[in-house]
Image (cartoon, rainbow, N blue to C red):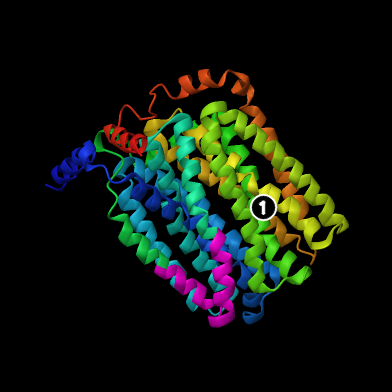
């Protein structure tokens, strides 16, 4: 009986009349994608205060980020396989419940290692929202159109990391750092309620029928694909640099350069504004120039910014602003790297979108573990460890982008035709995507 009800529901959402508003879908998917940012960015200004309250050093508090990334990285592999078999919405709901529990655990913790444990739980839940929101985009769009929609989502959800550190700094000043985690509990509850207004995007006929135990074997097969490795590597090295930035800037700005905690969010927000701008530009440029060309240009800019940062971090040239300028440039090119690397990896695997999204996410956030962990392990009270990690990450992203850029010099219209045979960007095997795209085109 339940199977019959599920089948009727799937048939219903495949009908254009049942397609929800394009803007409502964008808003909910943006909120889901934002969980990676709000889970960490909001408490960044409170990290020095947490270290003092918990009698921990900077390196230990930095590991709260690394622990989160461990859970986030490995959890994606589980949720990706589950969603390809059972659909997207139920796994996201289960993940949000875990996120709420983990956030409450962090708020009640009495020691830094207890927080580290609950951060892993929090991440295991949050990653379901992020990885499956990307798979939902692939359910509905493909090729450059998918990259365009991912950029749109990232630009919208960038409000979270833009406001997160600012709100976190104010909350820490007026209510203490524990109140930040209670706020995340509230965010999780609101998002869970909104999720149930979004219909399932993966109809039953397109779901995987193989056992979940075989999912890791399928991950092994995907890892043999050179294009997936190239795209995932370009994003992974960049994520290593991004999380080195996240782990290193609170101490580089607040402790080393004596920036007030409540002002940290303003400096952090400059990079987020850059991300918004480049994602908006990407939505306009990717259909014209193709995924690979934009990815290559972004990786080149990241490499140059990283090398400049390493120089200023080592010499202290320019003081705070000498450090700030290359950091903002590095972070800003996320709009040209993240969405294109994900869309490029998923382009040829519409029926394994959950697994490919999970695999790419696991590789990227695994690299984030390395980036933030290296900053914590080599912390010496100066910005230098952050500087050299970001420089290495930028160069690595450029090398990986080059692996898949051989076709980037083909004519853009030929690449668009090759990757996106349907002019609207709809996925032929999913009629629901036609309804979404029809609404989008009308808008």
Horizontal arrangement in the rendering, residue 277 relative to residue 443 (left or right)? right
Residue at 50% from the left image edge and 48% from the top image edge: 154
Residue at image position (15%, 41%) is 8
Tell me where residue 439 sits by quadrant.
top left
Q: Is residue 383 visible?
A: no
Residue 23 vertical placement versus 322 (above, below): above
Closer to us: 180 or 333: 333
Please name the residue shown 56% across and 59% down the image: 162
Percent of width and height locating residue 165: 58, 66
Q: Where is residue 360 in the image (x, y as percent from the top left)?
A: 52, 41
Magenta residue check for 182: yes
Q: Circle 1 — which element? A: helix
Q: In this view, does 303 lie above or below 160?
A: above
| Magenta region, main secondary structure | helix
Q: Give the position of the C terminus as an image quadrant.
A: top left
Q: Is-magenta flag for residue 335?
A: no
What segment carries the magenta color? 162-186
Total marks shown come to 1
Q: In this view, does 430 lie to the left or right of 181?
A: left
Residue 137 appears anywhere in the view: yes
Residue ID for mark 1: 371
- In the displayed structure, 147 sits above or below 132; it is above
Residue 140's place in the image compared with 418, above or below, is below
Question: Outermost residue toward the left?
Answer: 1
**Residue at the outermost front position:** 443
From the top left corner, tell me how far across and down residue 337 is, in percent: 60, 40
Give neighbour class at mark 1: few <14, some 14-19, many 20+ (Cα, 10 Å): many
9 or 415, which is in the foreground? 415
The picture quadrant where one finds residue 399 is top right
Residue 21 at x, y = what percent? 30, 46
């Amino acid at each position: 009986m339940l199977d019959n009800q599920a089948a009727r529901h799937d048939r219903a959402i495949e009908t254009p009349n049942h397609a929800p508003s394009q803007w409502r879908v964008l808003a909910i998917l943006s909120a889901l994608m934002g969980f990676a940012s709000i889970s960490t960015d909001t408490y960044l200004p409170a990290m020095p205060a947490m270290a003092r309250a918990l009698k921990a050093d900077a390196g230990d508090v930095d590991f709260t980020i690394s622990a989160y990334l461990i859970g986030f990285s490995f959890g994606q592999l589980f949720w990706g396989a589950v969603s390809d078999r059972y659909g997207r919405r139920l796994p996201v709901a289960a993940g949000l419940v875990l996120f709420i529990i983990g956030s409450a655990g962090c708020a009640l913790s009495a020691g830094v290692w207890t927080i580290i444990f609950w951060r892993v739980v929090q991440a295991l839940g949050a990653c379901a929202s992020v990885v499956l929101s990307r798979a939902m985009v692939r359910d509905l769009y493909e090729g450059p159109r998918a990259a365009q929609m991912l950029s749109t989502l990232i630009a919208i959800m960038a409000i979270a990391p833009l406001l997160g550190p600012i709100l976190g700094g104010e909350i820490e000043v007026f209510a203490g750092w524990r109140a930040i985690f209670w706020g995340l509990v509230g965010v999780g509850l609101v998002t869970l309620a909104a999720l149930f207004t979004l219909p399932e995007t993966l109809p039953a006929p397109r779901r995987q029928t193989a056992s979940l135990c075989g999912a890791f074997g399928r991950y092994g097969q995907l890892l043999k694909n050179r294009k997936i490795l190239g795209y995932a590597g370009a994003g992974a090295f960049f994520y290593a640099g991004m999380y080195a930035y996240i782990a290193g800037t609170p101490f580089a700005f607040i402790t080393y350069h004596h920036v007030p905690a409540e002002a940290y969010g303003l400096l952090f927000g400059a990079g987020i504004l850059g991300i918004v701008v480049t994602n908006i530009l990407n939505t306009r440029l990717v259909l014209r120039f193709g995924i690979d060309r934009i990815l290559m240009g972004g990786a080149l800019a990241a490499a140059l910014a990283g090398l400049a940062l390493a120089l200023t971090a080592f010499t202290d040239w320019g003081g705070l602003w000498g450090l700030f300028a290359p950091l903002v440039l590095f972070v800003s090119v996320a709009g040209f790297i993240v969405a294109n690397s994900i869309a490029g990896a998923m382009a040829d695997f519409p029926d394994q979108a959950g697994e490919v999204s999970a695999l790419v996410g696991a590789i990227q956030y695994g690299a984030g573990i390395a980036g933030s962990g290296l900053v914590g392990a080599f912390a010496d009270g100066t910005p230098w460890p952050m500087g050299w990690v970001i420089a290495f990450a930028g160069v690595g992203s450029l090398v990986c982008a080059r692996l898949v850029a051989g076709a980037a010099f083909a004519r853009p219209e030929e690449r668009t035709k090759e990757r996106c045979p349907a002019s609207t960007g709809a996925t032929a095997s999913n009629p629901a995507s036609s309804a979404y795209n029809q609404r989008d085109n009308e808008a």
